Image (cartoon, rainbow, N blue to C red):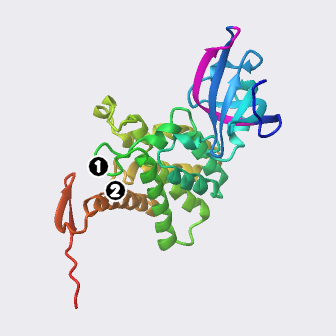
Amino acid sequence: MNNMTTLESNKPHHDILRITSIVSQPDENGDPTHIIKLGCWNMTYTGIADTHCMIDHDVLKHMGVVEVIGHRYWENNEAVIYLTYIGKPSVNQFMSLPCLYTLPKDICPLPDKAAKLVSAINGMKTTPLKHMIKLVLERGDRLEPFMRLPASQKDHHAHPGGLLEHSLQVANNVVAMIEMNEPDLPIEMKEAGFVAGLFHDIGKLMIYNVSGYKQPVVGLIDHDQLTLELCANGLAHLDRVMPNVSMLLRHVWTCASPGARFGITAKTTLARYLRDADGQSAMSHNHQRVTRNYQLCGFRSIHKQQFWNPTLGHQA
């Protein structure tokens, strides 16, 4: 610490952050020192944990959520925390944080889409639904893939961050359909529609890898059938506080598109909004791809879909 150039004085720091990388190396005495990249939505830090730091080694893992205590400095315009403690936060500490507070912005290929997601979720009024999103999404094995994965291997939104882009578009479109067709629906129903759209493809976290290729499990089960499994903890929370909304989401995810996945026909308008919003998002993305060059008119095909780009003549 003697060689530090500080832009602000030694400042105590206590926070809940997420680990994005860990490098361990010996100091001049041969004692282990951990250099830990820590992040949240608003800030990125370099954490220094040496022999003076109390460490719960069980939490030192990629994308793990940690409670940190230490002293913060600025070194070469970089925020550095010399840690005195790093360990597991309590459930109450974690649940009291704003939704996606621990999302490190630097893991998002499409930070503008991630910013819209953070804003939309924290603008929600229904606290149980916000808690459900936290329980489903803010896990170390889900948050980064949800930000990074494509929505498909070769079809619509087949690029890094495509799953986030498609999911957010579907969620917003469902809400827009509700507001257009049933503006008097309670806010809880509108926000349930947002959650339904946001998580309708979450099963793809178990289907695709970060490179966009399907995993071998795709030969055994489709992503549709994994949605309820990945949302189980969140649905269990809703069962205790909003049981009808919890059952509504189960219904919507199992019958929404196309037709009845598990043999039950759609019995709510929300299910049909989700079906249509999902199809519109996929088709509009593909249509934009094939009509990028408007000089190429007529019928064009992509992935067994055919689109017509009409010739637009200018009248005198």
Say whether marks 2 and 1 touch (CB < 8 Å).
yes
Furthest residue in direction top, as rendered: 30
Query: Disc 1 on helix, strand or loop?
Result: loop
Query: Magenta part of the protein: which range?
Result: 15-29
Position of 6 relative to 59 (above/below): below
The amino acid beneath tag 1 is Asp
The residue depicted at 76 percent of the width and 24 percent of the height is 85
- For label 1, the residue is 155
The location of residue 303, given as percent across then percent down, is 22, 51
Q: Which mark is residue 207?
A: none
Q: Is residue 180 left or right of residue 123?
A: left
Q: Nearer the viewer, residue 49 or 269?
A: 49
Task: Based on the picture, tell me whether residue 23 belongs to the magenta stretch.
Answer: yes
The location of residue 93, given as percent across then percent down, is 73, 37
Q: Is residue 236 visible?
A: no
Of the numbered discs 2 and 1, the one sitting upstream in the chain is 1
Residue density around tag 2, few if under 14, some if 14–19, many if 20 or more, within 10 Å = some
Q: Nearer the viewer, residue 52 or 17?
A: 52
Q: Quadrant of residue 237?
A: top right
Q: Quadrant of residue 45?
A: top right
The residue depicted at 72 percent of the width and 18 percent of the height is 50
Task: Based on the picture, tell me whether residue 133 belongs to the magenta stretch.
Answer: no
Furthest residue in direction bottom, as rendered: 316
Q: Is residue 285 left or right of residue 50?
A: left
Residue density around tag 1, few if under 14, some if 14–19, many if 20 or more, within 10 Å = some
The amino acid beneath tag 2 is Ala
- For label 2, the residue is 282
C-alpha separation, residue under disc 2 versus residue under disc 1: 8 Å
